[in-house]
Amino acid sequence: MPNQPPVDARFPGPRVVAGGFAILTTTAGLGFYGLAVYLNAFSKERGWEVASLSFGTTVFFVVAGIMGLYVARLIARYDIRLVLVAGGVIGAVALLLLGRVNSPWQLFAVYALYGVGFAAAGLVPVTTVVTRWYHRRRAMAISVASTGLSFGGVAITPAMKWFVDRRELAGATPWLALVFIIGTVVPAWFLVRGDPAASGFSPDGDRLAPGTQAPALSGTPYRAALRSRFFVCVTVGYVLALGSQVGGIQQLVKLAEERTTASTAAFATLALALTSIVARLIGGRVFPRYPLTRVIVVLAAGQMVALVGLGLSQRVWLLFAFIILFGATVGNILMLQPLLIAERFGVREYPRLFSRSQFVGLFGTAGGPWLLGYLHDAAGGYDTAYVVAGGLSLAGAVVFSIGGTAENTSDHSVDDAPAAAR
């Protein structure tokens, strides 16, 4: 038939997941985990206070959260590859400028620009495109793609810390910018595809008959989902759980360096990320067998134990034991946020709902690093800071527990949506 889109011989879904994995590997390794390396480097090279540097991290996450709302609108109107490529270019420019920073206000400005790039090449577009390509196997597809977040901490961040320690920021950041643009722009353009129907498939790999159209995306209407108790509790719970988690991650390198040595501290992020990878892949297979609300409650409580243990540990072996426990919760808690929203409310309004949940969550992800940095400076160490972070994670577990069930409504019709949103 004329004007039919070209079809692929094989289902492109695995390539899309691989592209998302590569993009998140890069943005997490140089962004999410990398922020801890930049904080440590600026502290040593410039002698700036940890609280001031932690506020820069807060600016990064605030801008990324706000930008996520606009990214959700952009990917609904334009080819998702264009958004990802733009994010890669903007992030690379920010890294180039980072090495030229000479005052805190310049750091805040560069981190704001970096937050824009991070959002445009981050979880919102990647998880959106994965939810479009997979419905029945969504949990496993999201777990594989989002494992890039942890793999970036393994494959990129330790090498990046070694490189920054030897070249300092001014000499290292041009090379980091090159890695950023290659690791985001190339997979975005050559591996990611925005719509399975354009390739002749419906989600999960079922071939569309010639001349047929893919069924319209189903799910709960946006405003009904937004007002539901489940959405409110998941969003508030993630403010608390991710606030404590991100704060703990961003301060981890400095905590380990204060209590061990610089070379040992480099392995702290590596141990965290390796554990997160293994735990996330196991979780992608195991968690769909259990009520997801119970899973997130258990994980948030486990994160509380890990954070309190990190704050009170003085021996190296004990410190790394709690880092491993922390890593087991980190990857799965982050993976479950998009999965909970997609499973409960479907895919039609997923980008708007997930970006809105992330936007509210920035009060935690942005405030967590600053809070732990402030408590470090005020108390003269990380003991109090990590115990407080553990308390926040426990509060998150309580909020999750009252949200209700995450019943799978991804295949419900629009007519069924109000009942699902109750």
Image (tube, rainbow, N blue to C red):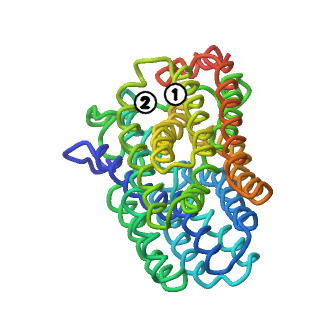
Q: Residue at x 19, y 46 (%)?
A: 9
- Name, please, the residue furthest toward the front: 315
- Where is residue 133? Give x, y as percent: 38, 39
- The residue mark sitting in front, 1 or 2, is 1
Q: Is residue 264 left or right of residue 74?
A: left
- Number of the label disc, if any, that sits on residue 267: none
Give the residue type that dot 1 points to. Answer: Ser
- Where is residue 39? Give x, y as percent: 62, 67
Q: Nearer the viewer, residue 187 or 307?
A: 307
Quarter of the image that includes the N terminus: top left
- Name, please, the residue furthest toward the top: 419
Q: Nearer the viewer, residue 370 or 193?
A: 370
Q: Residue at x 61, y 85 (%)?
A: 100
Judging from the image, what secondary structure is the residue with disc 1 in? Answer: loop
Please give the count of numbered marks on the rendered protein.
2
Give the residue type that dot 2 points to. Answer: Pro
| C-alpha distance separating marks 1 and 2 | 8 Å
Q: Is residue 415 above or below residue 44?
A: above
**According to the image, label 1 marks what residue?**
218
Judging from the image, what secondary structure is the residue with disc 2 in? Answer: loop
Q: Nearer the viewer, residue 301 or 9?
A: 301
- Where is residue 322? Give x, y as percent: 50, 41
- The answer to which quarter of the image holds residue 93 is bottom right
Quarter of the image that includes the C terminus: top right
**According to the image, label 2 marks what residue?**
215
- Name, please, the residue furthest toward the right: 378
Q: Is residue 225 above or below residue 366?
A: above
The residue carrying pointer 1 sits among few (fewer than 14), some (14 to 19) or many (20 or more) residues within 10 Å by Cα, namely many
Evaluate if marks 1 and 2 touch, with contact meaning CB atoms under 8 Å apart.
yes
Q: Residue at x 61, y 49 (%)?
A: 248
Q: Residue at x 44, y 66 (%)?
A: 263
